[in-house]
Amino acid sequence: MATGTAAQKHRRTTWHNWAGNITATPARVVSPTSVGELQEAVRRAAEEGLRVKAVGTGHSFTAAAATDGVLVRPQALAGILSVDRAAGTVTVAAGTVLKDLNRALAAQGLSLTNMGDIMEQTVSGATSTGTHGTGRDSASIAAQIRGLELVTADGRVLACSEKENPEVFAAARLGIGALGIVTSITFAVEPLFFLTAREEPMGFDRVTAEFDQHVTENEHFEFYWFPHTGNCNTKRNNRSQGPAAPPGPVSAWVEDELLSNGVFQAVNSLGRAVPATVPAIARVASRALSARTYTDIPYKVFTSPRRVRFVEMEYALPRERLVEALRELKAMVDRSPLRISFPVEVRTAPADDITLSTASGRETAYIAVHMYKGTPYQAYFTAAERIFTAHGGRPHWGKVHTRDAEYLAGVYPRFGEFTALRDRLDPDRVFGNDYLRRVLGG
């Protein structure tokens, strides 16, 4: 019996991310149920010379959370810890999944101001890698942080905000896991409100010609271009007085389940098996979505189910460079033998003051390219990355890219500020891994 227990204790398990393109085999996995247990796990790992990484739900496409040391699963550290209605803030444990946070806030008549379209991530994983939605005035989820606590390499809990350890706060809101393990986050929230969404097909030439106008006139504007076509689908979200008028159950099922997940899964599988069918499929798919308008509370408008698995690269460009870069991307796809079955997503963000935010210090537009899981993506992503970097692009920290510290130091004016802080907080690289060595340097 004792032998079997010992064997279980030393058996290594392999972790893989949501897309299946990243795997890791840690020496051990820990699931702390308290901050104290997490502190002890970090101290013990440091004493043993093991590196420590926390992993959320695996929605990153990079190896940001991969480790051969101690893998921390923070899911037991979850839930709302406190609500301060006077200050307009809510403090949540780091392992809280965004879906659960959104629902809990709505039940209390509260909401985040902006969010991305995927809500399966933990709050710490989403903010640490720079998850964002789209917004003219409202920025990423990390930009809505008002305070946080993290366990540092020596096992201490460090609290930071604009007033307390402000230099850490400036960086740790989006720390890529390099500065410590986040244990709790305080977000700014506001009373629950309504958004009216207008989804409308639009031609590529028109939407690019009118891009600045759409961004200026709408609180939240985004669009999807379908490669191999001149077709796009646009989405405009703006605040309204309500009342809620969600899509009817049949319409919602057709648009969000059948077309966006069920049929989309089938056509991507066909495209993977027979690439020659992709352009024809894209032409049909890009015409399948019709115009619709609906009103609901924020998370029901911003987020949508994503059951078709894919691999993604996303770059943040100076907003004024977006249209030129996107037209170059379209020209590249049109003249290449590539077969792209996933639409290209375009979003925006205002400038923010977070050290390594992709929108740090500049008005930003994002271009995201995707490939269906199991489809070779390197040729497409390499060609797209060449275009994005020529326009001064910054890669999303949690999505596929090939950039290194030398390149990133050139596109982030405050890069040295972050690495100096890392040297101070984690000189022995307890929280290091191969990915961080590449993007931040030794």
Image: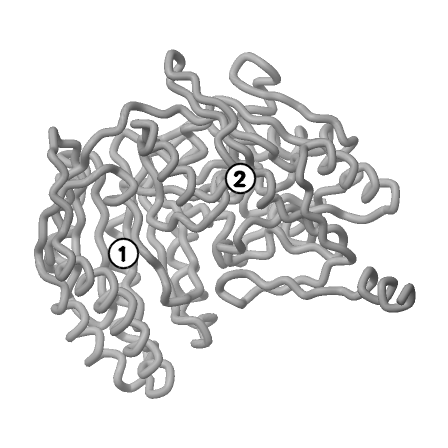
**Vertical order, 6 against 351 (above or below):** below
Quadrant of the snapshot with the C terminus: top right
**Residue plotted at (36% across, 30% down):** 351
Separation (CA) of disc 2 from disc 1 = 31 Å
Quadrant placement of the N terminus: bottom right
- The residue under label 2 is 124
For residue 61, the mark is: none
- Amino acid identity at mark 1: Leu
The answer to whether 429 is drawn above or below residue 234 in the figure is above
The amino acid at mark 2 is Ser
Q: Residue 306 appears at what percent x and percent y?
A: 35, 59
Q: Quadrant of residue 37?
A: top right
Q: Is residue 38 left or right of residue 99?
A: right
Question: Please, which residue is most extreme toward the front here?
Answer: 1
Q: Position of residue 346 (x, y in %)?
A: 28, 51
Image position of 48 (left or right of 214): right
Quarter of the image holding residue 288?
bottom left
SS at mark 1?
Answer: helix
Instruction: Between residue 338 and residue 7, name the one nearer to us.
Output: 7
Residue in front for this viewpoint, 180 or 439: 180
Local secondary structure at mark 2: helix
Q: Residue at x 47, y 48 (%)?
A: 121
The picture places residue 192, in percent across and down from the top left corner, at 26, 28
Label 1 sits on residue: 326
